[in-house]
Image (cartoon, helix red, strand yellow):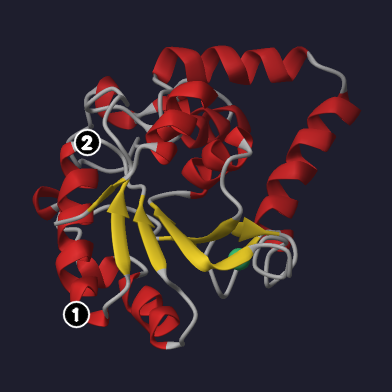
Amino acid sequence: MWVGESGGGAARAPPQALGLVAYYPEPVARLIEALQRLPGIGPKTAQRLTFFLLKRPSDEVQGLAESLTQLKQLIVHCRICFNVTDEDPCRICSDPRRDARSLCVVEEPNDLLAIERTGEFRGRYHVLLGALSPLDGIGPEDLRVRELLARLEEPGVEEVILATNPSVEGEATAIYLAKLLKPLGMRITRIARGLPVGGDLEYADEVTLSKALEGRRDFT
Ligand code: ZN
């Protein structure tokens, strides 16, 4: 029996409302639907990926499945900086050679990695896990702002670098944090322009990002 078909007199749903489950064996439909939820993957790509995987050797697909499972089993957010890590605290937080006087605030773990790749920054990080976006209902309480404040209550940090993205949300987040942190008395800087507006730190090339970090300005 097709999913969505009812035995009795109830009105039958039109075919497009039955979803993929009506057309594919259940495991195939489930995977297509799961892949479709990933960013940048539409129904066509999800179908293509699913049928591609069907053709691959079992051990290869098994390997992929294990990586997915381990992603959630072994990867956690660092309890100090909220970077993703397989050891808590993460390698950066537990490295005594990193300069604890300088704290770089970023939106996402990928932004942290982008800055790490420049090799220019030797301080520590704080990952907000998002940016303020009133339209999407994302307020300060949805970000790791409280945890940032708690970190800054401990003495030692002399400069906070606001390295949120040069997007509307990133700018709003930087302005919000600058106001919030100002009374604490440490230097607050914002990475320089030169990064494409509306862009993402993650996709900036290393030279541009290095320059942006170098040219950071005091937040007034
Ligand atoms: Zn950490």
Query: Residue furthest toward the right?
Result: 59
Residue at figure coordinates x 63%, y 38% from the top left: 119
Relative placement, left or right, of 153 versus 24 is left
Residue at figure coordinates x 31%, y 65% from the top left: 187
For disc 2, does the CB lie below 8 Å from ligand 1?
no
Quadrant hosting residue 181: bottom left
Q: Is residue 44 above or below residue 119?
A: above
Residue at figure coordinates x 73%, y 61% from the top left: 91
Disc 2 is placed on an element classified as loop
Q: Position of residue 51 (x, y in %)?
A: 64, 14
Q: Is residue 178 above or below residue 31?
A: below
Marks 1 and 2 sit apart, C-alpha to C-alpha, by 25 Å
Q: Is residue 111 above or below residue 182?
A: above
Residue corresponding to mark 2: 167
Q: Is residue 90 above or below residue 42?
A: below
Q: Position of residue 200 (x, y in %)?
A: 36, 31
Give the residue type that dot 1 points to: Pro
For disc 1, does the CB lie below 8 Å from ligand 1?
no
* Nearest to the observer: residue 6 or residue 44: 44
